[in-house]
Image (cartoon, coloured by chain):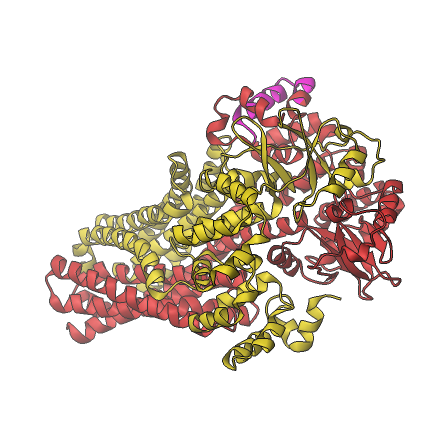
Chain colours: A red, B yellow
């Protein structure tokens, strides 16, 4: 009935982890077939797999196995598999494929997928692929490539179904029955005026359920969005998600219909942006994927670690200001990391909420002040709570009541600063056009470290010595 | 042509921030109409808005304005707006609506949206809404509610279009033209065998472009996934994303077709999971949204801060072991936070990559060992790099060559431990069934803090004193 059934037979343990992903036993069998150079067995094993799963397989095996796999099974690596591959590997695999195999592979793809493939390739590979396309498709792809990167024009496909606004259901159906080159997936017929400007869309479901004599314009959907080809893909993806769009028309500068964006394109953009946000928040800036080499990964992470080193040294300079104080009471050195660490964590919490809310457009100019007030209150409240707890811990541990008072006050101030920094820094960065997910972390940590060490050691030097 | 045009007229600045979201000027105008109790003006202002935008509006204004808005505009708050509202506020708004308004609101919704509304409501509100539904829809909703939370059965809608497997295109079209209760959005006709088991799906596009005499079963799509109603929504969303599904049939325990899941449901699940992952990685555990009260938010964050306090105290105990050493050389207190902070950041980087790769199923049993090896190499490499840099900084700052050597070795060991902890802890947590996004942070920080302080201070006490 579906592929899961036979995957489960192949691997009795598959259900445990997940019934959809490539299961381990099949991967092992594929690697064995590879080892044995048994091409028939290999083809039989990958035949039932979805292109997305074959792409996953290629990503998961090691580089030597990967080269071997492409050599042996190259002719089965169609355009759909190439489209599913992560960008870093795609170039490598395309480089290993022969030009004829490659030409064959791209011929079945919709124009948006061809554009997506071409974007990251060297000029030479690009020309080879373009040369393999039919003239009209080549022109469509070249036109798309003239739009800026990450724009609606790059995301769209040229294949779509349109109809003059005065057509009836019957005319639309007859037109579709006659056309040879319908898109592989489509969900709307776009109505256009005589100047080719989209004026409405009709779902296939409504066409299908209406009499032949009904006018298409009486069936148009209420929600209708048109995207200029120069719109950013971020805005397009946001609108698809917000308004539950399935497909939408794209227009050029004279408002003529030139393409269509479908929900799977929008989902791919959202997915990438989520991924990027998570990694950036975690301080992983330039990393493409698990298949990056050690050097690529180390370099990508080093940038951010270097920024962190500067903030850490800055914090240490603050500590050094109070070296004499610490010299007189070593308990301060023992306790000071707690103040900074709690501040850092509270700051990260607030910053995460802020970055996320900016991305989902829940945090706006409208409510920024109110949300900041809430965060300050949350910070103050938790500052008092944990300040008191730590006062108790410090009193018991070191038996110095004034030390307990100092750490309590320092924690309250630090938590409060963490809240203000955690919300204020992302908002400011967003205002000046810097991605808050990327840059907030180091700033927030600097604030919490400096405030933490300065208030704790400063108060101690005033009160305790 | 579309709504943006008139939004831009209303707000010349709208283009600057974003042309789709609610613009600030409209929100201000709405609040003014609210203040003036001008119901007509209010209706006119919200009329052109998409339900998702009205929901955003309700989320962004403050609690008092919100109550006032629902009192004044309650009759315009239809089911679609309720569906779009975030869960925390939905209950509040539903509580403010009169029973007749509520009954009217839910009547137009597909059954999955009604289920989604009902899930979080009190028994009394639940009964009121169920009472407002027609008998067949009520039964469908009640049946869905018998499936476990977060299952395909809860996610699906009962409204769908099916056809016996032997039908032709003509029969399917005639059937759809006759039916009164077609789903509001649908993309496939599901073919069923005589026992009502789904055996294939045909896109509306292919039906539309084929002659009336063509058999439906000659048009079935290659990719076809059937979900048992008890499948988790996570698995369903993963499959929609991986295999680019648009809609898919859901079956009960006897494999009979009982519902349909569409891509917008899957997108909503993915969105929620992304959101949860980001927040959990940032240490925000139980937070629903920006509209949580101060107390709700403070409590949600306190849990995690408390865990962090324990790990921070644990790290301080390690420092305390070397109190005598610090007492003899206060430079150690100045430098030790750098070692721990760099370790913590490197650990967070690796952990973020690991958590993300586990969620996207890129990190599997197949490649876990290889990825761990890569991370260890990255950690070692960056450890050497930053160890040397810090050795230089320490030598210049304090003029003690052995101190420079100590910090270099401590940083290498800490970065290495951070890499192993950052990858190993999420993998282990995932194996034992704990969400790695939720629990990895505190463990990783404990490892890096303890290793950082212990190696740096320990080496110092061995070598320097």
Please indicate whether residue A414 sits to the left or right of residue A280 in the image.
left
Residue A76 lies, with reference to residue B100, above or below; the image says above
Q: Residue furthest bottom?
A: B36
Please indicate whether residue B29 sits to the left or right of residue B126 in the image.
right
**Residue at the image point whose x is 54% and y is 27% from the top:** A23
Residue B297 lies, with reference to residue B148, above or below; the image says below
Pick whichever, B261 or B236, lies toward us: B261
Q: Position of residue B106 (x, y in %)?
A: 54, 54
Pick whichever, B310 or B449, lies toward us: B310
Q: Position of residue B157 (x, y in %)?
A: 58, 43
Q: What secondary structure predominates along the stretch shown in magenta?
A: helix
**Residue at the image point whose x is 20% and y is 64% from the top:** A388
Can residue A31 be seen at all in this image of the molecule?
A: no
Magenta-highlighted residues: A22-42
Q: In which quarter of the image is the N terminus of chain B?
A: bottom right
Can residue A12 be seen at all in this image of the molecule?
A: yes
Q: Position of residue B313 (x, y in %)?
A: 23, 54
Q: How many marks?
A: 0
Q: Position of residue B63 (x, y in %)?
A: 43, 70
Is A27 within the magenta?
A: yes
Please indicate whether residue A384 sits to the left or right of residue B267 in the image.
left
Pick whichever, B247 or A81, lies toward us: B247
Is B440 within the magenta?
A: no
**Residue at the image point whose x is 71% and y is 59% from the top:** A224
**Residue at the image point whose x is 22% and y is 60% from the top:** A335
């Amino acid at each position: 009935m579906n592929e899961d059934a036979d995957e489960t037979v192949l691997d009795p343990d598959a259900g445990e982890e997940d019934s959809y992903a490539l299961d381990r036993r099949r991967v092992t069998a594929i690697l064995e077939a590879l080892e044995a150079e048994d091409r028939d067995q290999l083809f039989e094993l990958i035949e039932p797999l979805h292109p997305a799963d074959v792409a996953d397989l290629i990503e998961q095996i090691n580089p030597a196995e990967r080269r071997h796999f492409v050599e042996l099974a190259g002719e089965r690596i169609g355009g759909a598999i190439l489209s599913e591959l992560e960008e870093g590997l795609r170039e490598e695999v395309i480089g290993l494929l022969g030009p004829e195999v490659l030409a064959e592979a791209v011929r079945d793809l919709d124009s948006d997928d061809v554009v997506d493939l071409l974007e990251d390739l060297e000029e030479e590979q690009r020309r080879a692929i373009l040369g393999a396309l039919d003239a009209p498709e080549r022109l469509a792809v070249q036109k798309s490539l003239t739009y800026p990167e990450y724009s609606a024009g790059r995301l769209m496909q040229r294949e779509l179904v349109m109809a003059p606004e005065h057509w009836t259901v019957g005319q639309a159906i007859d037109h579709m029955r006659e056309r040879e080159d319908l898109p592989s997936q489509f969900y709307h017929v776009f109505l256009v005026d005589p100047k080719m400007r989209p004026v409405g869309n009709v779902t296939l479901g409504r066409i299908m359920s209406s009499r032949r004599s009904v006018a298409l314009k009486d069936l148009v959907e209420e929600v209708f969005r048109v995207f200029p080809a120069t719109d950013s893909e971020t805005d397009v993806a946001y609108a698809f998600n917000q308004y539950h769009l399935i497909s939408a028309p794209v227009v050029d500068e004279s408002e003529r219909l030139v393409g269509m964006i479908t929900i799977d394109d929008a989902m791919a953009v959202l997915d990438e942006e989520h991924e990027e946000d998570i990694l950036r928040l975690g301080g992983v800036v330039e990393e493409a994927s698990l298949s990056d080499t050690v050097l690529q990964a180390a370099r990508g992470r080093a940038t951010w670690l270097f920024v962190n080193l500067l903030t850490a040294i800055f914090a240490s300079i603050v500590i050094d200001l109070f070296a004499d104080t610490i010299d007189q009471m070593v308990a301060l050195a023992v306790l000071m990391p707690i103040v900074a660490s709690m501040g850092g964590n509270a700051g990260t919490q607030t910053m995460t909420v802020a970055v996320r809310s900016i991305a989902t457009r829940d945090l706006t100019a409208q409510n920024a002040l109110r949300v900041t007030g809430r965060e300050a209150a949350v910070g103050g409240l938790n500052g008092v709570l944990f300040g008191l707890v730590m006062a108790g811990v410090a009193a018991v541990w070191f038996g110095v009541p004034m030390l307990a008072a100092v750490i309590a006050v320092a924690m309250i101030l630090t938590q409060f600063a963490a809240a203000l920094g955690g919300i204020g820094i992302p908002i400011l960065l967003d205002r000046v056009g810097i991605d808050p997910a990327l840059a907030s972390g180091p700033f927030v940590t600097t604030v919490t470290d400096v405030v933490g060490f300065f208030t704790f050691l400063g108060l101690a030097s005033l009160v305790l010595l």
